[in-house]
Amino acid sequence: MILGLYEQEVMENLAGGFCSLLSVVDVGAADGYYAVRLLHSGKVDRSVAFESMPECRAAIARLAAETAFRTR
């Protein structure tokens, strides 16, 4: 199985589907890919990621820190 190849295509569809949003909420955010990438695209001003698994929440925090979006 090949994992991780669909995210870019989905992201392109999400980012291209609207002009801009104030906020996006990602419930079941897993590693936070969409929540952080939508911020990076500039299409949203604020992104909130919810994840129930502690290890995934830690991954989201790392990704946000690495991309300097911790407070957005």
Image (cartoon, rainbow, N blue to C red):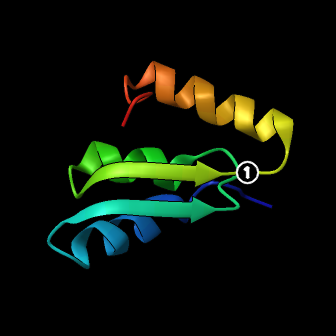
Q: Residue 17, percent across and down?
A: 26, 79
Q: In this view, does 45 lie to the left or right of 72?
A: left
Question: Mark 1 sits on what residue?
Answer: 51
Q: Which quadrant of the figure contains the C terminus?
A: top left
Categorize mark 1 by other alpha carbons within 10 Å: few (<14), some (14-19), many (20+): some
When the figure is inspected, residue 49 is found, relative to residue 14, above or below; the finding is: above
Depth order, front residue of 12/56: 56
> In the rendered view, does 58 fall on the left or right side of 52?
left
60 displayed left or right of 35: right
The quadrant of the rendering that contains the N terminus is: bottom right
Kindly state the secondary structure of the residue where label 1 is placed.
Answer: loop
The location of residue 28, given as percent across then percent down, is 70, 61
Of all residues, the one furthest to the bottom in this rendering is 17
Residue 34 screen position, x and y as percent? 49, 55
Image quarter for residue 29? bottom right
Give the amino acid type for the residue marked by disc 1 in the picture: Glu
Q: Residue at x 43, y 59 (%)?
A: 8
Q: In this view, does 63 lie to the left or right of 4?
A: left
- At 44% from the left and 44% from the top, the residue drawn is 36
The relative height of residue 43 versus residue 68 in the rendered view (above or below) is below
Residue 29, compared with residue 32, is above or below; it is below
x, y percentage for residue 6?
Answer: 55, 65
Residue at horizontal 66 percent and vertical 44 percent from the top: 31
Question: How many discs mark residues in the rendered view?
Answer: 1
Q: In this view, does 58 lie above or below 43?
A: above
Residue drawn at 23 percent across, 72 percent down: 16
Q: Quadrant of residue 68?
A: top left
Residue reaching furthest left? 19
